[in-house]
Image (cartoon, helix red, strand yellow):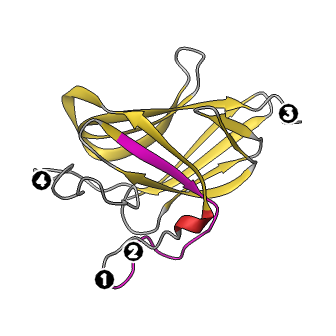
Amino acid sequence: SRKNVTYSKGELQLDLFYCSPSKKDREIFGNLVPYNEVWRTGANEPSTFTTNKDLIIAGKPLPAGKYTLWTVPNDSNWNVIFNSKQYSWGVDMEMKPMRKPQFDVINIKVPVHQLDISVEQFTIGFDNSTDNLKLTMAWDQTKISVPLEISKNSD
C-alpha cells in the first residue's frame, strides 16, 4: 500500500512517499530482500524523500530537494543512499534496481537494531522523541535509524 508521511517543525518540512509491502510469514532480510544488494526500499516505485531545507545526514550535506531512497541491507548494518534522480519504477524488467549510482548524493552506513517484535508492514517514518530527528525504517525484526539535522547554512 502507498504511504505518505510528513514531518514539520518550525520552517522544516520533510515528505516521504513509499510503498509498504507486508511480511506474510516470509523471511525478509537475507531472503526476500537479499543482503549486500541494492533494494528499492519498499515495493513498486522507489521511495522518495523531499526536504525544503539543507540537511546534514550523518555528517554529510544534503541540499534541499527531492531524492529517491535506496538501501543495501546487511545483517549488522545498512547502507542508506539518497539519489538525486527520479525513476518511474523501482526495478527494471529483470527486477534489478533502477538506481544510477552517479546520482548518489549521500551513501552512509547505519547499524541494524534487532527488534523483539515483528513488524508486519514495512514502515518508514520520522522519530523526534529525543529531540534528535531520525529517519527510521522497520520491517520484520529489523530497524534502522538515520540521523537528520538542519544545516546551519540553511536559510
Few, some or many residues within 10 Å of mark 1 (<14, 14–19, 20+): few
Few, some or many residues within 10 Å of mark 2 (<14, 14–19, 20+): some
Amino acid at the residue labelled 1: Glu
Q: Nearer the viewer, mark 4 or mark 2?
A: 2
- Secondary structure under tag 1 reads loop
Mark 1 or mark 4: name the one nearer the start of the chain: 4
At x 67%, y 29%, the residue is: 149
Asked if disc 1 and disc 2 are in contact, CB closer than 8 Å, the reply is yes
Mark 3 or mark 1: name the one nearer the start of the chain: 1
Mark 3 or mark 2: name the one nearer the start of the chain: 2
Q: Between marks 3 and 4, how big is the CA–CA gap?
A: 45 Å
- Secondary structure under tag 3 reads loop
The picture quadrant where one finds residue 103 is bottom right
Residue on which disc 3 sits = 153
Asked if disc 3 and disc 4 are in contact, CB closer than 8 Å, the reply is no
Residue on which disc 1 sits = 94
Amino acid at the residue labelled 4: Arg
Q: Between marks 1 and 2, how big is the CA–CA gap?
A: 7 Å
Q: Between marks 1 and 4, how big is the CA–CA gap?
A: 22 Å
| Range of magenta residues | 78-94
142 part of magenta stretch? no
Q: Is residue 83 left or right of residue 99?
A: right
Q: Between marks 3 and 1, how big is the CA–CA gap?
A: 42 Å
Amino acid at the residue labelled 2: Val
At x 40%, y 70%, the residue is: 97
Residue on which disc 4 sits = 26
Residue on which disc 2 sits = 91
